[in-house]
Structures are given as structure tokens and as C-alpha cells.
Amino acid sequence: MARYYSPETYGVLAESISQILFTAEEIEARVLEMGQEISRDYNGTKPLLIGVLKGVFPFMADLIRAITVPIEVDFMAVASYSSSTREQGFVRLQKDLDEPIDGRHVLFVEDVIDTGLTLNYLLRNLNARGPASLKVCTLFEKPQRRLINIPVRYKGFDLPDKFVVGYGLDYRELYRNLPFVGMLKPEVFRPGT
Ligand code: IMP
Ligand code: MG
């Protein structure tokens, strides 16, 4: 039985997409590989996976089911500021972790690393809490847009310097429910308006 509906089924959402970059099946296959690698590396340690809401939740849900060793999960939420404020290194925590992370092996899970500024802020914050280890896992990365160099231990795919939606990624809170990832038509995507 098919696991996903075809893109056309998504009606007005699909009509806003100019090009599909990663199909649901391609994402699924890559996430299974990532889970296998993480399971091998963390065997015997019971890592804590930390995700930043909301964009990460479909990836996190699929990734944890591809991990075959015991794990725990926790989430943070940050306020999205304007990009100029973000560049100055300000990120406001809207929801902090439920539990302390000192002595824990932490795997920080992201949907997409764009400039890296948000991630840099959060990693410094988490590092100050004394984890036994802190590594980064991201589904997507835009290498051309990086302003800060952060070591990424697990990466799903590189993205071009383009705004994409689907599989958790939104444009004005829409498109998160698409099972594939694609680019928006120029008449739909109007940054700064
Ligand atoms: P950074 O601080 O520039 O790395 O911002 C990363 C955050 O921006 C991600 O967690 C996303 O919420 C958002 N973001 C970056 N690129 C995209 C995109 O192409 N589509 C949707 N959201 C994006
Ligand atoms: Mg977002």
C-alpha cells in the first residue's frame, strides 16, 4: 500500500510549488540511513535528542523511529525575530527544556541550517549546561548561506540558496503538512511583504 498521497492531491498547496526538490520517498530513505548511523554511533549511551519547534517535528518523528537504541526526546521553542535582530545574536527562548542535560549525550536536531545564527545561539546556551557531549543533526543545510561555522555531525541533504517548504518547513505557517520538499512559485513567495 502507498504510504503517501501524490503531490497533486494537495490541491492549492501543491499549486503553489514550482519544483519538488525532494520527494517523500527520497526523504524517507535518507532519514532511515541517518537513524541507522546514529544508532551505531550512540550504541550503549541513551542519548537525548533535542529539537526546536515547530519546523523539526515531522523530521524528529520519523528520525526517532529510525533509531534502534534507547533514546529520550525534548523540545525547545524560540521566537522568530527579524533577520537583522537575529544577526546580532538575539534569540528568545519561548519554551525551555523540561529536564537538565548535565552529563547527558545530547544530539541537537534541526530541520534546516540557514545562516547558522539561531543554531549557534542555542548550542552555546546548551553547552553552558554541561552535557557530556553535544552534536548536531540536520535534515537540510544551505552551505552557501552559512555565516557561522558549526560542525554538523549528521546531515540529510544540501539545499541550494532557495526558500523551500514542506515536511515541517513553513512559509507564513503554511505548507508544513506536505510530505515532500519544494520551492514556492515566485508569485507566492514574497519575502519582506
Ligand atoms: P538560521 O538562524 O538562519 O540558520 O535560521 C534557521 C531557521 O530559519 C530554520 O530553523 C527555519 O525555521 C528557518 N528557515 C531557513 N530557511 C528556510 C526555508 O528555506 N524554508 C523555511 N524555513 C526556513
Ligand atoms: Mg520557520
Image (cartoon, rainbow, N blue to C red):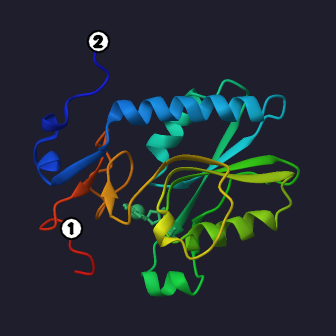
Residue 101's place in the image compared with 40, above or below, is below
Left or right, residue 80 beside residue 169: right
Would you identify the image quadrant in which residue 88 lies?
bottom right
| Residue, disc 2 | 1
Q: Quadrant of ligand 1?
A: bottom left
| Residue, disc 1 | 189
Q: Residue at x 77, y 35 (%)?
A: 42
Residue 24's place in the image compared with 133, above or below, is above
Q: Amino acid at mark 2?
A: Met
Q: Residue at x 26, y 76 (%)?
A: 191
Q: Residue at x 44, y 41 (%)?
A: 58
Element at badge 1? loop
Q: Amino acid at mark 1?
A: Phe
Mark 2 Cβ inside 8 Å of ligand 1: no
Residue 184's place in the image compared with 11, above or below, is below
User: Which percent across, then down, holds residue 103?
Assistant: 88, 50
Q: CA distance from mark 1 to mark 2?
A: 34 Å
User: Which percent across, then down, holds residue 170?
Assistant: 33, 57
